[in-house]
């Protein structure tokens, strides 16, 4: 298949899945089968596309010109490829997991759930393949809207309140800051296309450029840089598969992906570094890393602790991008992938614990590890990866960002990374410790969650280790990214 | 025949009004109105096509010289307005039959259509005439018939709303006439084009400035420019649905047209926006409109009032485009004229359908209506999205132009005002969508069925148009762009 | 002092117009009685008729009727315009009064504050 056809396939398959699922309302097996088939087809198409990109192919496709200079266009580049690969690959595992979770917990409105999920993946693909800032913006907003029914899935008052906060913060930040930033870029540069080396070189002075960057960073609230992070803990009322794939991978990664992509392809790393307009960002990201970790220390609700951990980890990516040096940018790209597989493992495990043991709080997790060894074993792998212990994927991203920081002598960033590693250990190790403590004399009966959940979480845990051992694909893509 | 099209544009609906008044049969009245609307649209479309092909058309009524006689003058700007008004009239015509029959007493239905046709006559007349005083006469024809239309609302408050509308509207019209009188005294003509030529040669600027002030305030009242909008919410809220639909979509738009015509073509953009602080005043009022009226809309519990205040806020965006006085800004403002006409006509028709089926006005009354009338409620949702300015709808196009225009002019704060006020729109539209779709239906709604097809079709034609023009922008933006350039160059 | 007074007297028609205009507008705003409001409105409109017609009168001129014996006559256009404006004014007044009658039937009063108080009780 040609590259352009593949681009279309990648966009259409999840959208078509979303449209097909309602036809099987009332037939759970067929419905979930559709989701799985869609996920596998999508991943297949993405892998074919990946092969082309690794060979240097850069297919592009213009769909429609809305206004002069405002086009809906798609173009693939290494970073988008990386994001698309992660999101589509994990969708398969997540679908498997969802089937176990949604059935075992007897969740209502499952058809809506699967529709919205497929639509969210479709929007993520749109973000990953966006060829210009306007297309990126469109799919970014779409992603917010289609995930809203997932956040409010429980339909309780709490869920509705969380949903309102979710919409208001994400839509508010993006219309108030992101949209003007897009317009400003268009007015200043005369184009909105992503181009290697950026499009703003020589078109803007240093101070306005810093302001524009601020509009982007805070307008893209999905990246959860403080103070626009509050929607993420609120979104944790959603069922765990949503938290796992969307609020640990697709949605939040769409945020940091967009920031990274804008820094590389709109501003241009060198341009920004020369102007010094992005220096402040490292401090904001550093502050977010430390502050979010500190808050995470004090969260007893497991999913909320994971959410704050996500906020902190997302800012690693932002920090890597903000250092504006090739190694750190490479680290940021790798960290997108590394955090994805690790954090989804953690959420999968949390959801499995919820399903099998009905435990939601860290303080109630004592001894859970012996009853659910597979689950908590995988959880431990994910936790180690979050801390950055080899041989897990988390080490890679941190390592390159650290190298980048050292290479330009950015000691603040170095200090942040070291301190946050300690904090990460401080809030993850106690969970692992208490889960596997006090086995007691009595033999414990093993009671794992349903097998689809366990399979999914073990596979992601294995992936977390495998990515450390064989980091070729993410590494090659990241290399291509910094090579321009 | 073809050379008399400009006259026919006004004569046809006038004769329609007469015919309806004479026959006084409800069904016949509706048929006549529909036929008139279609004819008017055909005429307007032919005029637009002719203008685009061969340039402006000048038509002398009775063959009098323009210095003392009345000239009808059609260029791209008003051809665009004529097409807009008559297209709205055609689309809403099928909706009128059941809606008017259910909300207006049977013996008054024919009178309703008489007034409706007169209002149409007046609006088309204002748009087509090239004579300042003739514009006043048509403005009053449309206004007087609008007062009567509003007064036919079923609640007694409609009478008060009509009375207040009459007082304010007459003051506005009189201010306008005072301004025109001053201009006439200084230039000796009422022909807009001749005024534009002579106004620069007038020695004393003071009467001209006074005339500008009177005309701005007078038309400001008619177009409901903040803070001269007080008549609008009650008038729209208590009028029969069909009257709200037509007035919200067209009446203010025509006043805006005349306003822009005077500022740009007659007084001249240079005089108004460079020599006088009109930019400052208009921008200030527009910003106040979008925020204050938007905030008031947020707290409304009656859906008609909510969208009436929303109209005031949306007019703020249009005047913002006028205040920017650049091609981009004016294009944005003019596209928003079209958008707002489409969106508000669709919304008020959908509300009319709610009233027709469920007699529901307040949030509590129509909560959960999405389950009972899904197509109507979905139309409200889509039109609401366009009101916010979601990409893929027309609302996005105009706001994008306004934001870009503000940035090109270096008014960064205004760009943020535009997107910030969209958040208010998001909140009040969100409230409506939430009430329609995310609540359990009230017991009183258990017998409610979907709106009849003759209501749904016009609603969805307009909703479809808001989406279509949001994706294929060539027609609206192209024409608006030409119109903006003509306005900025002065009357051609 | 004399010149100021002289100018004032020379433009006496203008001052009358302004006086009528302002008092008409004042009545519209200040009065709660809906008929009185309409009277004020008519006064306001009438002042505009004078605004148009008084400058059109030429001293020593005849009414604008063509006659070979006279060469100086008033400017006819404003008269024609105001004829139209008077029609508009009458229509407005008639409609306004009709509304007041209907309001009186519906509310039993034509005082604005009583009507608003009545509607608030609903």
Image: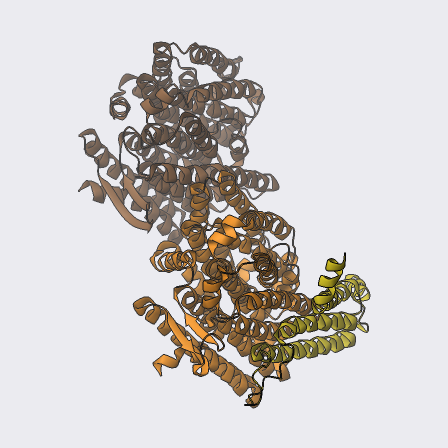
Chain colours: A brown, B orange, C yellow
Q: Is residue A167 above or below residue A449?
A: below
Give the image location of residue A389, x and y in percent: 39, 12
Residue at 64%, 75% in the rendered image: C53
Give the image location of residue A303, x and y in percent: 52, 28
Q: Quadrant of the N terminus of chain A?
A: top left
Question: Is A250 or A71 nearer to us in this picture?
Answer: A71
Give the image location of residue C76, x and y in percent: 57, 80
Q: Is residue B53 above or below residue A270?
A: below
Question: Is C23 or C54 nearer to us in this picture?
Answer: C54
Q: Is residue A439 left or right of residue A268?
A: right
| Residue A106 in view here | no
Q: Is residue A121 above or below residue A428?
A: below
| Residue B76 in view here | yes
Residue at 39%, 55% in the rendered image: B470
Q: Quadrant of the C terminus of chain A?
A: top left
Give the image location of residue A253, x and y in percent: 40, 31
Question: Is C84 or B364 nearer to us in this picture?
Answer: C84
Q: Is residue B8 left or right of residue B25?
A: left
- Give the number of callouts: 0
Q: Is residue C69 above or below residue B171?
A: below
């Amino acid at each position: 298949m040609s590259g352009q056809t593949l681009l279309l396939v990648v966009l259409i398959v999840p959208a078509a899945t979303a449209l097909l699922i309602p036809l099987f309302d009332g037939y759970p097996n067929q419905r979930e089968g559709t989701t799985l088939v869609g996920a596998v087809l999508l991943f297949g198409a993405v892998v074919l596309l990946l092969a082309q990109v690794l060979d240097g192919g850069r297919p592009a496709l213009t769909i429609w010109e809305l206004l002069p200079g405002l086009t809906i266009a798609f173009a693939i580049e290494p970073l988008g490829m990386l994001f698309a690969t992660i999101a589509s690959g994990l969708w398969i595992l997540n679908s498997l997991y969802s089937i176990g979770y949604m059935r075992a917990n007897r969740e209502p409105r499952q058809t809506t759930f699967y529709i919205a999920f497929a639509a969210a993946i479709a929007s993520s693909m749109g973000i990953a393949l966006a060829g210009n800032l306007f297309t990126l913006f469109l799919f970014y907003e779409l992603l917010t809207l289609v995930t809203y029914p997932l956040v409010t899935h429980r339909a309780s008052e709490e869920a509705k309140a969380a949903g309102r906060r979710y919409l208001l913060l994400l839509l508010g930040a993006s219309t108030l800051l992101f949209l003007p930033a897009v317009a400003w870029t268009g007015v200043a540069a005369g184009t909105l296309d992503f181009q290697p080396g950026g499009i703003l070189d020589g078109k803007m002075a240093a101070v306005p450029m810093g302001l524009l960057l601020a509009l982007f960073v805070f307008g893209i609230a999905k990246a959860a840089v403080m103070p626009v992070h509050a929607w993420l803990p609120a979104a944790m009322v959603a069922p765990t598969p949503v938290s796992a794939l969307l609020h640990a991978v697709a949605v939040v990664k769409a945020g940091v992906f967009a920031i990274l992509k804008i820094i590389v392809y709109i501003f241009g790393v060198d341009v920004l570094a020369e102007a010094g307009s992005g220096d402040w960002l490292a401090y904001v990201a550093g502050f977010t890393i430390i502050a979010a970790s500190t808050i995470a220390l004090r969260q007893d609700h497991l999913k909320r602790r994971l959410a704050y951990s996500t906020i902190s980890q997302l800012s690693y990516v932002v920090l890597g991008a903000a250092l504006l040096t090739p190694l750190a940018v490479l680290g940021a790209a790798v960290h997108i992938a590394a955090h994805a597989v690790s954090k989804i493992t953690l959420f999968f495990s949390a959801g499995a614990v919820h399903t099998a043991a009905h435990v939601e709080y860290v303080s109630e997790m004592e001894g859970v590890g012996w009853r659910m060894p597979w689950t908590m074993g995988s959880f431990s792998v994910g936790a180690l990866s979050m801390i950055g212990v080899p041989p897990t994927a988390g080490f890679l991203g941190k390592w390159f960002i650290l190298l980048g920081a050292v290479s330009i002598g950015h000691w603040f960033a170095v200090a942040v990374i070291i301190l946050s590693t300690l904090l990460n250990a401080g809030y993850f190790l106690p969970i692992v410790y208490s889960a596997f403590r006090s086995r007691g004399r009595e033999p414990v009966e093993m009671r794992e969650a349903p097998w689809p959940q366990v399979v999914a979480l073990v596979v992601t845990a294995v992936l977390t280790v495998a990515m450390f051992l064989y980091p070729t694909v993410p590494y090659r893509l990241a290399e291509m990214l910094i090579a321009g | 025949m073809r050379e008399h099209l400009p006259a026919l544009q006004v004569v046809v609906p006038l004769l329609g009004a007469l015919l309806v008044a004479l026959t006084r049969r409800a069904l016949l009245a509706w048929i006549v109105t529909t036929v008139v609307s279609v004819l008017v649209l055909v005429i307007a479309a032919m005029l637009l096509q002719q203008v685009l092909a061969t340039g402006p058309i000048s038509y002398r009524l009775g063959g009098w010289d323009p210095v003392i006689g009345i000239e009808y003058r059609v260029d791209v700007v008003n051809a665009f307005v004529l097409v807009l008004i008559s297209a709205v009239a055609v689309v809403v015509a099928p909706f009128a039959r059941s809606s008017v029959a259910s909300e207006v007493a049977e013996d008054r239905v024919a009178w309703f259509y008489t007034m409706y046709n007169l209002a149409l006559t007046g609006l088309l007349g204002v748009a087509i005439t090239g004579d300042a005083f003739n514009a006043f006469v048509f403005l009053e024809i449309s206004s007087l018939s609008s007062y009567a239309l509003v007064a036919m609302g079923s609640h007694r408050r409609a009478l008060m709303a009509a009375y207040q509308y009459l007082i304010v509207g007459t003051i506005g019209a009189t201010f306008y006439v005072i301004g025109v009188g001053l201009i006439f005294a200084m230039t000796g003509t009422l022909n807009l084009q001749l005024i534009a030529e002579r106004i620069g040669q007038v020695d004393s600027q003071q009467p001209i400035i006074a005339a500008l002030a009177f005309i701005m305030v007078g038309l400001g009242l008619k177009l409901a420019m903040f803070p001269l909008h007080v008549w609008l919410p009650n008038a729209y809220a208590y009028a029969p649905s069909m009257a709200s639909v037509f007035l919200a979509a067209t009446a203010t738009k025509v006043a805006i047209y005349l306003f822009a015509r005077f500022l740009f073509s007659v007084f001249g953009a240079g005089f108004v926006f460079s020599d006088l602080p009109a930019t400052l005043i208009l921008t200030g009022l527009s910003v106040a409109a979008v925020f204050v009226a938007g905030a008031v809309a947020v707290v409304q519990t009656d859906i008609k009032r909510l969208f009436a205040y929303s109209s005031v806020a949306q007019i703020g965006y249009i005047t913002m485009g006028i205040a920017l006085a650049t091609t981009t800004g004016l294009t944005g403002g003019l596209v928003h004229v079209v958008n707002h006409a489409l969106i508000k006509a669709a919304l008020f028709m959908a509300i009319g359908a709610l009233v027709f089926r469920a007699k529901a006005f307040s949030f509590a009354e129509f909560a959960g209506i999405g389950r009972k009338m899904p197509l109507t409620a979905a139309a409200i949702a889509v039109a609401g999205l366009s009101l916010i300015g979601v990409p893929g709808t027309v609302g996005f196009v105009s706001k994008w132009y306004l934001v870009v225009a503000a940035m090109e002019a270096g008014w960064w704060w205004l760009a943020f005002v535009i997107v910030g006020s969209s958040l208010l729109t998001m909140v009040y539209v969100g409230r409506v969508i939430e009430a329609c779709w995310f609540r359990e239906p009230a017991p009183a709604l258990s017998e409610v069925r979907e709106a009849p097809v003759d209501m749904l079709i016009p609603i969805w034609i307009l909703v479809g148009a808001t989406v279509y023009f949001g994706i294929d922008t060539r027609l609206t933006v192209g024409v608006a762009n030409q119109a903006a350039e003509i306005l900025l160059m002065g009357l051609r | 002092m004399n010149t100021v007074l002289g100018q004032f007297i020379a433009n006496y028609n203008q001052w009358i117009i302004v006086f009528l205009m302002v008092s008409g507008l004042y009545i519209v705003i200040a009065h709660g009685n809906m008929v009185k409001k309409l009277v004020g409105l008519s006064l306001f409109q009438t002042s505009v008729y004078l605004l148009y017609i008084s400058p059109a009168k030429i001293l020593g001129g005849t009414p604008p009727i063509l006659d070979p014996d006279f060469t100086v006559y008033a400017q006819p256009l404003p008269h024609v315009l105001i004829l139209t404006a008077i029609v508009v004014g009458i229509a407005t007044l008639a409609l306004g009064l009709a509304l007041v009658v209907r309001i009186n039937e519906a509310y039993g009063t034509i005082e604005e504050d009583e009507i608003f108080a009545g509607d608030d009780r609903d």
